[in-house]
């Protein structure tokens, strides 16, 4: 039910709830609801699920057109979770006049849930709590259970005499078991909550702006070791004033509580001024809290929920479509405040979170805007059903990118000032995120801000920015990426931030057109700290010579070079890297500069390239020094055509099967040793011996001849040997061995990781012959696999994984895809078309 389709809207709730009933599975409720008629009506509806209504009246004495309390007929549509209230009918019957106000009184009973943590739920014999998000308030009281409707609340609770009650506004016990709570500010139903139980508490005070002293309290069930929440309490005390400073706005509540319950499906919930959390999330041991990583995670979690007190609880959003933004905004602010902006520069963000989100673009079914809309159906009863993790993570990336744009452009202070206007203008009603961006846009006197947000939330994929050098002019051009997933998409230019080591590029903050030309002396490199949600392709050898000079002079760091190489590696993985990229990496590695972050990424990238003489020469040079342990396997593979390397690896390989234990192969080098051996096999005869290493029995047998890392379990070591063997098989060169590999994969098609050697084989074969062999092999065998394996069908995940490998190999080798064979199942043809 959409609120705007109803004839009457609530503006205030006065709730009296009695939990002292002998029947502990239900509670008694009386709801007085002030309604405003948006049009003349004789009936109206409210959400109500599991509520047994015994009486309902409507007092039209507030100018409603009829006067006095009218008994209402009530019908329940249990399936839809709706209560329909009807005024008396007949001549002279009263009506609820448009623009009038009236008090609806409903007497009812409701359910205390014991099968989940939603609505009113039992947390054990000494704890009862509520969780209303997204659509469970309707099980607690009649309401319009929509985020677009905000009301104030007054609450009276009757609870067991020795229990303590807590809600979203300050309260006190007027007599044993009776608790009265102050009228709240305007809230949507999802953010109103209460709890009671045999609680213990620890308290402190945060000193806020204007010397306001805000009480901070952690409540938890007696015996739950609430004292272990001291770190959480200190975190809230420390960061509440810092958030006031970030938002340039006073804390909008009178208190800040953290309520710990035994279990909570969403783990944590940002009810207004009363954050609820599962106790196990907060009550960590001193050993756990000794870890800086755990401390940061705890602080980030709590500050995230505290951010919601401004954005999410004070400024609220009018649709579940915007849940991704609500959560992304809170995480962005929390990471920034807790780390003092250093979080964004770390490898976990740039190399894992941001890069991981970009990789999800390959399989994402739409843009942030379209995916979030598809999640927000009326049938979604749990937050997890509304929440799209990809949209959330991309939202964080967009907000961080925007922050860097504002900082580089000198507008960050103005943006913080504009947030003050958010809280002034938007707290009485619910809004859409774009309403906030328009307010900030007016403060900054630019339309770039809402246009920037629209560009990144309504476009799928991300930009690939190519950079070329022509006679001293740098040409920068953008196109949508990834190329296969989005090749039929409209290639609309994004608002690309021109991040450079000195801030702006040629005095410009954003590139909003397809291309841009700048003078050579105005350009160093793009996306210097990997804060932009895009990749950069440098397509002239001169750039890599410049990078070497900057590395030598200290003008570029190893970490910054690693960002550049990471983009090239992705292009190589996708089969669209050019020789200039691989040659550029060789140029950088030949500089003799120690690059511990760049080196393993660079070698990984070269493994995806055709093996050229200069690459092998570089690898041989690097092996003569003391290369880092994690790069030795990569270097061996790059030296696989070198006779000396081949002889050494053959010796180590032979030693696995009964040689001296004084010459053991390090486990982390095993994949390289095996790859060199496989690449130099001239006949199919040794294949059986190699394949045995991919079995548990064979891998276990060679462990005595492998140098294992300290503390590794035998089962883990066995799996590592099996995986190394599978990874090496794809380096086969001889045609008979290619057939051996394909036969082996066919026989073990249901084995985990069987696609790995297929990918390597397709990539290493000359002129795309491996990809064609793979395509023919798949089409000649898939029907047999389905028939041979019970329960297999065209939708079996393992088979789809192999199919995706085959399609990707063919597309990478040929730059395009053939038509689907006529005998393919329809869903496979659709999968090919989707690519």
Image (cartoon, rainbow, N blue to C red):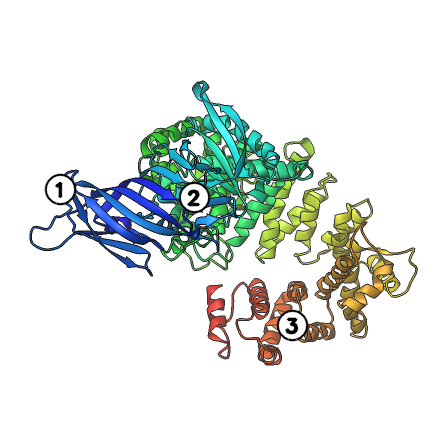
Residue bearing mark 3:
749
**Height in image: 364 above or below 439?**
below
Q: Name which residue lies at 50% across and 60% down.
A: 484
Could you say where residue 435 lies in the image, as x and y percent from the top left?
Answer: 33, 39
Pick whichever, 493 or 284, lies toward us.
284
Could you say where residue 663 lies in the image, as x and y percent from the top left?
Answer: 90, 56
Q: Secondary structure at mark 3?
A: loop
Q: Nearer the viewer's eye, disc 1 or disc 2?
A: 1
Q: Name which residue lies at 65% across and 72% down.
A: 749
Tell me how far mark 2 sits from mark 3, CA to CA: 42 Å
Q: Is residue 44 left or right of residue 399?
A: left
- N-term mark: 1 or 3: 1
Q: Nearer the viewer's eye, disc 2 or disc 3?
A: 2
Residue bearing mark 1:
67
Residue 279 in sight: yes
Residue 538 in sight: no
Residue bearing mark 2:
325
Could you say where residue 521 lies in the image, as x and y percent from the top left?
Answer: 54, 33
Q: Around disc 1, counting alpha carbons within 10 Å, would you say few (fewer than 14), some (14 to 19), or many (20 or more)?
A: some
- N-term mark: 1 or 2: 1
Q: Give residue 15's quadrant in the image.
A: top left
Pick whichever, 320 or 597, lies toward us.
320
Pick whichever, 781 or 235, lies toward us.
235
Q: Is residue 734 left or right of residue 459?
A: right
**Height in image: 86 above or below 230?**
below
Q: Give residue 228's quadrant in the image.
A: top right
């Amino acid at each position: 039910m959409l609120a705007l389709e109803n004839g009457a809207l609530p503006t205030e709730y006065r709730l009296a709830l009695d939990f002292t009933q002998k029947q502990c599975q239900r509670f008694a409720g009386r709801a007085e609801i002030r309604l405003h008629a948006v049009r003349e009506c004789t009936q109206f509806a409210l959400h109500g699920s599991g509520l047994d209504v015994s009486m309902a009246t409507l007092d039209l004495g507030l100018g409603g057109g009829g006067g006095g309390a009218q008994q209402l007929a009530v019908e329940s549509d249990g399936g839809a979770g709706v209560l329909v209230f009807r005024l008396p009918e007949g001549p002279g019957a009263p009506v609820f006049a448009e623009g009038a106000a009236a008090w609806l009184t409903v007497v009812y009973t409701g359910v205390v849930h014991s099968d989940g943590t939603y609505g009113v739920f039992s947390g054990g014999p000494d704890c009862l709590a509520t969780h209303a998000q997204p659509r469970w308030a309707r099980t607690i009281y009649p309401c319009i259970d929509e985020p677009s409707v905000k009301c104030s609340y007054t609450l009276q609770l009757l609870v067991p005499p020795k229990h303590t009650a807590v809600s979203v506004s300050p309260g006190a016990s007027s007599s044993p078991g009776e608790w009265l709570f102050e009228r709240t500010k305007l809230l949507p139903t999802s953010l109103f909550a209460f709890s009671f139980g045999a609680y213990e508490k620890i308290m402190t005070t945060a000193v806020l702006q204007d010397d306001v002293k805000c009480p901070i309290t952690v409540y938890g069930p007696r015996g739950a070791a609430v004292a272990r929440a001291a770190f959480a309490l200190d975190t809230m005390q420390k960061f509440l004033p810092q958030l006031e400073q970030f938002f340039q706005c006073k804390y909008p509540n009178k208190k800040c509580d953290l309520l710990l319950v035994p279990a909570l499906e969403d783990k944590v919930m940002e009810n207004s001024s009363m954050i609820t959390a599962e106790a196990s999330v907060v009550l960590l041991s001193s050993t756990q809290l000794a870890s800086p990583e755990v401390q940061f995670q705890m602080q980030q979690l709590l500050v995230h929920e505290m951010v919601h007190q401004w954005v999410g609880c004070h400024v609220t959003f009018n649709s579940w479509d915007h849940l991704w933004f609500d959560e992304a905004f809170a995480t962005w602010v929390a990471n920034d405040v807790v780390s003092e902006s250093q979080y964004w520069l770390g490898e976990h963000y740039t190399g894992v979170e941001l890069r991981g989100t970009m990789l999800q673009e390959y399989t994402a079914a739409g843009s942030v805007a379209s995916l979030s809309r598809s999640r927000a159906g009326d049938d979604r009863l749990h937050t997890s059903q509304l929440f799209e993790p990809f949209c959330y993570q991309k939202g964080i990336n967009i907000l961080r990118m925007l922050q860097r744009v504002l900082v580089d452009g000198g507008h960050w202070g103005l943006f913080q000032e504009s947030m003050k206007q958010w809280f002034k203008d938007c707290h009485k009603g619910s809004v859409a995120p774009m309403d906030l961006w328009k307010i900030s846009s007016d403060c900054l006197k630019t339309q770039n801000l809402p246009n920037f947000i629209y560009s990144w939330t309504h476009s799928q994929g991300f930009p690939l920015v190519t950079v070329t050098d022509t006679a001293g002019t740098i040409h920068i051009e953008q196109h949508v990426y990834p190329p296969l997933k989005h090749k039929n998409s409209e290639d609309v230019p994004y608002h690309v931030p021109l991040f450079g080591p000195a801030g702006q590029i040629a005095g410009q903050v954003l590139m909003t057109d397809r291309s841009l030309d700048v003078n050579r002396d105005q350009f160093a490199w793009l996306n210097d700290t990997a804060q932009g949600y895009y990749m950069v392709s440098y397509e002239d050898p001169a750039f890599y010579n410049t990078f070497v000079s900057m590395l030598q002079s200290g003008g570029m760091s190893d970490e910054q070079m690693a960002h550049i190489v990471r983009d090239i590696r992705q292009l190589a993985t996708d089969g669209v890297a050019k020789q200039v990229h691989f040659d550029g990496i060789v140029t950088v590695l030949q500089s003799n500069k120690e690059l511990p972050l760049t080196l393993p990424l660079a070698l990984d990238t070269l493994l995806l390239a055709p093996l050229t003489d200069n690459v092998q020469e570089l690898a041989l040079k690097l092996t003569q020094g003391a290369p880092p342990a994690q790069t030795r396997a990569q270097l061996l593979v790059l030296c696989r055509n070198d006779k000396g390397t081949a002889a050494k690896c053959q010796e180590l390989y032979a030693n696995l099967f009964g040689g001296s234990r004084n010459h053991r192969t390090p486990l982390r080098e095993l994949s390289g040793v095996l790859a060199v051996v496989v690449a130099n096999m001239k006949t199919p005869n040794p294949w059986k011996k190699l394949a045995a290493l991919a079995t548990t029995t064979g891998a276990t047998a060679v462990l005595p001849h492998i140098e294992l890392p300290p503390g590794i379990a035998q089962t883990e070591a066995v799996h590592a040997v099996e995986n190394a063997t599978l990874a090496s098989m794809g380096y086969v060169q001889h045609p008979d061995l290619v057939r051996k590999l394909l036969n082996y994969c066919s026989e073990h098609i249901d084995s985990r990781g069987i696609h790995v050697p297929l990918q390597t084989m397709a990539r290493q074969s000359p002129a795309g012959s491996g990809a064609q062999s793979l395509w023919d092999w798949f089409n000649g065998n898939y029907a047999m696999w389905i028939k041979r394996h019970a329960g297999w069908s065209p939708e079996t995940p393992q088979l789809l994984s192999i199919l995706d490998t085959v399609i990707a190999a063919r597309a990478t080798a040929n730059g395009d895809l053939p038509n689907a064979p006529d005998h393919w199942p329809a869903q496979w043809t659709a999968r090919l078309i989707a690519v």
